[in-house]
Image (tube, rainbow, N blue to C red):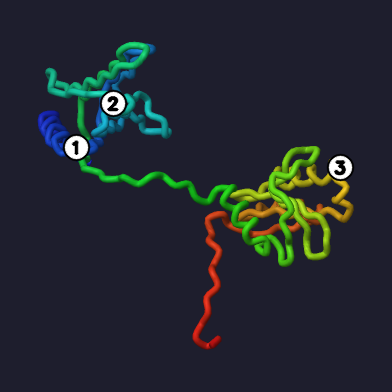
Amino acid sequence: MSDLTLSDSESEIREARKRDSTIVLAVNCEVQYDGRANSDLGGGDRLLVLKPDGTVLVHGPEKSKPRNWMTPGASYTFGLEGDELAIHAEQSSSEGVEELDIWVADVYDIITERLLDDREKSLAGTEADLKSRLVDNPELIEEGFRVESTEWETGAGPVDIFGYDSDGNAVLAELKRRQIDPGAVHQLRRYLEVGFEDDFVESEVRGIVVAPSISEQAMDLVEEYGFVFVEEDPRRKVSSETTSLSEF
């Protein structure tokens, strides 16, 4: 990382803005915010992010949340003021005008790039994905398993999947998108202990936990309670059947 002159940094920011580029600077700076409240950050090393949509982020060396920020729609100006590079951002809201002033004493590094991303975020690997796949493919839980209901109410809350195994025994299946811990096993245990008011649950009731993995302590409880653990990752896709030439 090499220090850049403030003059060179100003020129690079100016050229980057002409290209609608995102600008990331590693700097030493002071920050002042005036708006819904007032705050001051003394001199320190920070990461500044300036986006074409007006977003301004001031990050510290730690944690994910910025120390200060301006949301999309803000506007910012910049220029040399004495021995500092001054960045002024402001935006109007229903509560008045918000202003963010950043005084940069040193620029350690700067990155500018015109970024293109028009993709919508698509969540994958959720518990809902796992439940949907198991309902469509109940054999993934157990061969011969039949789904009767989802979010089936017990006296201790809803269980993810209720159904019957190949022997006609009622089964409660609790799903987790991440590793099963002892708490999830105890939760399933409570579901089975509260009893059932429905007349059609007259057989033995079994418990199954489904997740990508299980902790050692949780597995000990599964065995102690007579449950079954089924390994299934919500991100995994079910393979479709294919026919080879040798089968003709």
Under circle 2, the secondary element is loop
* Residue 208 badge: none
Q: Position of residue 231 (x, y in %)?
A: 64, 59
Q: Position of residue 163 (x, y in %)?
A: 75, 55
**Quadrant in the picture for residue 214:** bottom right
- Chain-order first, disc 3 or disc 2: 2
Q: Pointers 1 and 2 in contact (CB under 8 A)?
A: no
Give the side of residue 67 with respect to residue 140, left or right.
left
Residue wearing tag 1 = 20
Residue at mark 3 to residue at mark 2: CA–CA distance? 57 Å
Q: Nearer the viewer, residue 98 or 5?
A: 98
Q: Compared to 96, does 80 lie above or below?
A: below
Q: Position of residue 12 (x, y in %)?
A: 13, 35
Q: Quadrant of the N terminus?
A: top left
Q: Identify the residue shown where x is 27% and y is 24%.
A: 74
* Residue 197 badge: 3
How packed is label 2: few (under 14 Cα within 10 Å), some, or many (20 or more)?
A: some
Q: Pointers 3 and 1 in contact (CB under 8 A)?
A: no
Residue wearing tag 2 = 73
Q: Identify the residue shown where x is 66% and y is 52%.
A: 215
Give the side of residue 184 with respect to residue 178, left or right.
right
- Chain-order first, disc 3 or disc 1: 1
**Quadrant in the picture for residue 2:** top left
How packed is label 3: few (under 14 Cα within 10 Å), some, or many (20 or more)?
A: few
Say which amino acid is labelled 2. Gly
Q: Identify the residue shown where x is 30% and y is 32%.
A: 47
